[in-house]
Amino acid sequence: MIDVKGLKKSFGEIEVLKGIDEHIEKGEKVVIIGPSGSGKSTFLRCLNLMEKPTAGEILFEGKDITKLKEKEIDHVRQRMGMVFQHFNLFPHMSIRKNITFAPVKLGLMTKDEANAKAEELLKRVGLPDKADEYPTRLSGGQKQRIAIARALAMNPEVMLFDEPTSALDPEMVGEVLELMKQLADAGMTMVVVTHEMGFAKEVASRVLFMADGYVMEQNTPKEFFENPQNPRLKEFLSRVL
Ligand code: ADP
Ligand code: MG
């Protein structure tokens, strides 16, 4: 589904991604871990072209999306849902509007269709009675579940999660991880940056360790956690496990 070849990204003089080659299959759940500042967010943001790569190719369903024009880029972004650490809900819009705004504005659904979809999604994320609330009235965990519903409203092919539980109070982490597990079980292709090692062990088809702008190691969760090879990864795991 996604083929990344020689991906590099610099900000000014600083090279943040130094050459990444990855292949993500349909239905895979790829979990990315690694120290702060290693380029995890930049990698995710390059995948959906929120950041423009400095070099390399990103093939999405066979097509190099780094060569597209702005208009076509929007189309690619619609195929990739993104969930952020800080939810990024529209504060002045009701929950229903948060979910229906993009698909209606982009002409993908009529207002009625989008409202019906929002209702279905709110049930799916366990918040069926929140359609008329505003984001400020929700807990962090609820906000993140709405952000996931909003991303799903576009019927994405793949979901990208950038530390979706890092800003949550501990007691709310579980409800968001549980929803992500449901999505995984339903067959969604997922790329997840997280510090939740339990989630990685339980849900990932593959775990990647990023450090210094490279993917330094990757493996099945069992091998990755039980038999790490790279000294940097061993040291990282000894601190987080
Ligand atoms: P991670 O998500 O692994 O913590 P990031 O991808 O956010 O790492 O950042 C990697 C490095 O790139 C950091 O040194 C950060 O300061 C830098 N960086 C990220 N985004 C920008 C930007 N828009 N402009 C300049 N530097 C950036
Ligand atoms: Mg980050």
Image (cartoon, rainbow, N blue to C red):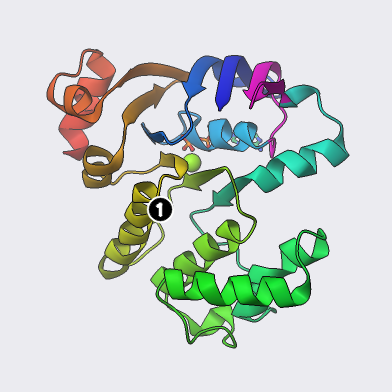
Label 1: few (<14), some (14–19) or many (≥20) C-alpha neighbours in 10 Å: some
Label 1 residue SS: helix
Q: Residue at x 41, y 36 (%)?
A: 36
Within the displayed image, which quadrant is ligand 1 positioned in? top right
Q: Is residue 60 left or right of residue 180?
A: right
- Asked which quadrant contains residue 99, the reply is bottom right
Residue under label 1, please give it.
Answer: 183
Residue 236 falls inside the magenta stretch: no
Q: Position of residue 188 (x, y in %)?
A: 45, 45
Residue 122 versus residue 206 in the image, above or below: below
Q: Position of residue 135 (x, y in %)?
A: 56, 78
Magenta residues?
49-64
Q: Position of residue 89 (x, y in %)?
A: 61, 67
Residue 57 falls inside the magenta stretch: yes
Q: Quadrant of the N terminus?
A: top right
Which of 223/138 is in front?
223
Which of 119/97 is in front?
119
Can residue 60 be seen at all in this image of the molecule?
yes
Can residue 140 be seen at all in this image of the molecule?
no
Q: Residue at x 57, y 43 (%)?
A: 157
Q: Residue at x 72, y 29 (%)?
A: 52
Q: Residue at x 69, y 35 (%)?
A: 49
Q: Which kind of residue does numbered mark 1 sit on?
A: Leu
Which of 181/212 is in front?
181
Residue 239 versus residue 235 in the image, above or below: below
- Asked which quadrant contains residue 172, the reply is bottom left
Residue 190 versus residue 237 in the image, above or below: below
Which of 92/232 is in front?
92
Q: Is residue 232 left or right of residue 88?
A: left
